Amino acid sequence: MGVGGCLALPWRCLVVLCLRLLFLVPAGVPVRSGDATFPKAMDNVTVRQGESATLRCSVDNRVTRVAWLNRSSILYAGNDKWCLDPRVVLLANTKTQYSILIQDVDVYDEGPYTCSVQTDNHPKTSRVHLIVQVSPKITEISSDISINEGGNVSLTCIATGRPDPTITWRHISPKAVGFISEDEYLEITGITREQSGEYECSASNDVSAPVVQRVKVTVNYPPYISDAKSTGVPVGQKGILLCEASAVPSAEFQWYKDDKRLAEGQKGLKVENKAFFSRLTFFNVSEQDYGNYTCVASNQLGNTNASMILYEETTTALTPWKGPGAVHDG
């Protein structure tokens, strides 16, 4: 309840209130607004939630009685406070101005306020409408999600504020930051691996800085081997075969020579597996190491393989070049 519901008065107090209102607004005289002889108060007062609102009413020496009302409730009559709300205080009651202050304004304080005066036995009123603005706040947003490629995604972002905030979705990815939609709900049909990443929900209404929250969307897909090249190495040298694969979740790697799986820790070999690649190292290449090798990358969504050859690379002895002026044997 706002300042309009300030005081629940006993029956006797209500009688006193009615008598005072009779002095303020005589029976049979209509209440008028915007009289040319009465300076009007501000039409609107706009404040942010939590700030203070000042309601001013201009008066002159013809005014004999003054009061501030919120709807049908009296806040102040002259210097007398009729409201129990401690946030409402009298700022000025002079020959030129009658003003009150509402501290720590909240949304329930929004609405019409009336300055009523008695002058020359004629009541006059001036109205002011208090508008309360509220910064945007995201009250509900989807949790992070993991989905297989080709599936459908539905994201939700609900926000409150006064005026109603505008909701904007953007896709945040390493490659680009792109606008997606302007709606509380974001629907993605047949999602692809390129659409994985973070999706940012922004709520703004110009009352304060926009508020943002993010949802992480992980798109799962089977392995795809992007690099697997054959390598030539001389006998007795160190040789490396590299197999790179992209996959979500990360792929597991296995190596085969012909149809035989290479065991981890096999003499003279080292298999090093990382999230996106596997490295097969030969510390001292022999004739028996040359041949066809197969890299297999797999996760729960599927597997793929690529073949490469470790072959012998021969070195050619170079004859020193003899330029002009060199001595030649006969």
Image (cartoon, rainbow, N blue to C red):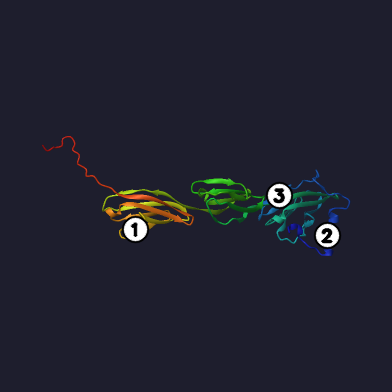
Amino acid type, residue under disc 1 in the picture: Lys
Say which of 187 and 232 sits in front: 232
Labels 2 and 1: the sequence-earlier one: 2
The answer to whether the residue labelled 3 contacts the one labelled 2, judged by CB atoms less than 8 Å apart, is no
Labels 1 and 3: the sequence-earlier one: 3
The answer to whether the residue labelled 1 contacts the one labelled 3, judged by CB atoms less than 8 Å apart, is no
| Residue situated furthest right in the rendering | 28
Q: Which mark is residue 134?
A: none
Residue at the image point whose x is 71% and y is 49% from the top: 45
In this view, the mark in front (2 or 1) = 1
Circle 2 residues within 10 Å: few <14, some 14–19, many ≥20 = some
Say which of 12 and 143 sits in front: 143
Q: Which mark is residue 45?
A: 3
Residue 302 in percent (x, y) is at 47, 54
Q: Quadrant of the C terminus?
A: top left
Q: Which residue is mark 1?
A: 270
